[in-house]
Image (cartoon, coloured by chain):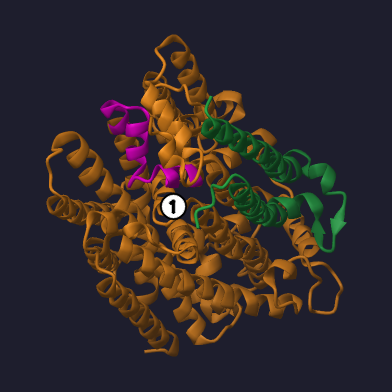
Amino acid sequence: MSDAQIWIYVLVALSFGLYIGIAIWSRAGSTKEFYVAGGGVSPLANGMATAADWMSAASFISMAGIISFAGYDGAVYLMGWTGGYVLLALLLAPYLRKFGKFTVPDFIGERYYSKTARVVAVICALIVSFTYVAGQMRGVGIVFSRYLEVDINTGVVIGMVIVLFYAVLGGMKGITYTQVAQYCVLIFAFMVPAIFISIQMTGNPVPQLGFGSTLSDGSGVYLLDKLDGLSTELGFVEYTDGSKSTIDVFAITLALMVGTAGLPHVIVRFFTVKKVRDARKSAGLALLFIAILYTTAPAVAVFARTNLIETVSGKEYDNMPEWFNRWEKTGLIAHEDKNGDGKIQYVASPEINELTVDRDIMVLANPEIADLPAWVIGLIAAGGLAAALSTAAGLLLVISSSVSHDLIKNVLKPDLTEKEELWAARLSAAVAVVIAGYFGINPPGFVAAVVALAFGLAAASFFPAIILGIFYKKMNSKGAISGMIVGLCLMLFYMLKFKFGIFDGGKEAVAGLQQSWWFGVSPEGFGSIAMIVNFIVAIVVNFFTAEPPENVQEIVENIRVPNQAGQAIEH
Amino acid sequence: MSEKQKKATAYWKENLRYLVILLIIWFVVSYGAGILFKDALNTIRLGGFKLGFWFAQQGSIYVFVILIFVYVHLMNKLDKKYGYNED
């Protein structure tokens, strides 16, 4: 066994032991503890937990790689997945906390005084969360298989058992405190190699400044200028310039921001703090913790891309470093010597290009490419697992509470006792883990594509209903329900048509349909259009139907002010 | 309208004013500087960064964090002013 292998086993085992220890220490004893951790989480802990909940396997493993190949266009993810927190902190979190219930469908159901609204919200929450969680379980399996040399399925099962243990036992309380630990593991794992590489390449220990500095080889050339030059030389577009249209960049960024603010597993985190002011503060802290990774990722992208081009482009295949062959075995990097000259041609033109690189390699193989010590590799494995497990757990909780609290307790069987509801919640969490694991082992081909679209779905369904519920007192149930249904269906239709081509003969037709995108907006960005349509439909329907009852308008007035407002309802 | 309601309405109005101002800044740094005016800003340089690129991949995120903390601070003051503070 190599040094790296031993480190991986040690660090992964230690971190898993820690999570299980926390789970046993923070068992949930009531539904309130199971759904919202008893409502007594400190803003700092909630900020860290939210950050871990938010940053998934995709943020940790794939994002830097995506940016690395997309250059400027990668900004849609950077801005989209952080800017949503401004909307959350300013427009949603404080009011939903004041409202003081357990789930997002809870708010929709009570604000729109309607079981139909609640059920529509449950369906939206389940669609969004299941598409998202399948990708996480797959991520767990992939990290296991690449680092521990077990097969992907065994990896998924190990991940399932761990999540099952602390999600079912601890509910939100267990999840919250494990997520705090997981945040620490993942941010440390992400930053250490980034700082090492930044020092190697630019001499600046702060990666955020490093990628705007000059190279440490004494040439005095700025790193980004060098990368722009290398990119154009090989026929790619300039790194700092994008290839997506401005309108599409705009639409995708908006869809991701609004989607972030509408994701139930993120919103529900703000139900766990004590006070309204804690909800605001923890949103700020969450974004601060997220920003540490999100401002480092574009730096890692630049370092990795420059390193890759310099190491492989035009070089003899036989002289490739050891890591090249090792990752070639996993299929993440592949070389096909088309012109038979023994050298690697890495260029934009698909006819001449001989190298295919999986984007995930930019983070996974980074420590080896930069020749970092073996324990850093173990750290990356533990970090990737922390990111995937923490997000999976948060999503599973949303699924289980939607079923046990919103469907069973509030719609199907209102006479459920507290104890029975707690067991129903545990059971639905367990069932959800098994379903998620099934999708992790047998991933439907569309999972990866759909995860990005989960944001579009959240933007198109939840966001307008919640915003109108808070900021438009006279918004009624018919308007909100029609808005949600139209928004969701429109988004699903656009996705099926332009992402999967099911109305035009399948996947092969997708590329040809690009010219007929509405307003030139891609399926990834369409959530912003569907959201606008949702708003319009809701307001128009509202205009022609009856006002909401007096007591509902009082609820709205009540959630707008922190504290004491409870008395304002009394007549 | 009762005294209590008047107070709540005034509080809400001030809150909305903060929201509008902060969200305008939010929009300008991300959609403005990072997307719509990126090419114009790219002619200006900040060390090794072209400014539009920097706003899109770094600057806007820093501003987002600052915006939330400014909001937290403003609202805590506003809560106190209207006696809505929770401690």
Residue A201: which quarter of the image? Answer: bottom right
Residue A193 visible somewhere in the drawing: yes
Label 1: how many Cα within 10 Å (few below 14, some 14–19, many 20+): many
View extreme (top): residue: A544
Q: Nearer the viewer, residue B3 or A134?
A: B3
Residue A105: which quarter of the image? Answer: top left
User: Is A362 placed left or right of A246 in the picture?
Assistant: left
Q: Which chain is orange?
A: A
Q: Nearer the viewer, residue A454 or A236?
A: A454
Q: Is residue A213 above or below residue A86?
A: below
**Magenta stretch secondary structure, dominant:** helix
Task: Give x and y (percent) for residue A329.
Answer: 43, 71
User: Is A81 placed left or right of A243 in the picture?
Assistant: left
Provide the residue designation for mark 1: A270
Chain of the residue that carries numbered disc 1 in the rendered image: A
Q: Nearer the viewer, residue A497 or A175?
A: A175
User: Residue at 73% across / 41% down in the picture?
Assistant: B28
Task: Give x and y (percent) for residue A370.
Answer: 61, 78
User: Is A43 placed left or right of A436 in the picture?
Assistant: right
Over which residues does the magenta segment extend? A94-118
Element type at marker 1? helix
User: Residue at 70% across / 79% down in the picture?
Assistant: A199
User: Residue at 29% across / 53% down in the picture?
Assistant: A35
Task: Give x and y (percent) for residue A511.
Answer: 52, 34
User: Is A442 placed left or right of A415 in the picture?
Assistant: right
Residue A505 visible somewhere in the drawing: no
Identified by mark 1, the residue type is Phe
User: Residue at 38% across / 27% down in the picture?
Assistant: A552
**Colour chain B is painted in:** green
Q: Is A107 in the magenta? A: yes
Picture quarter with the C terminus of chain A: top left
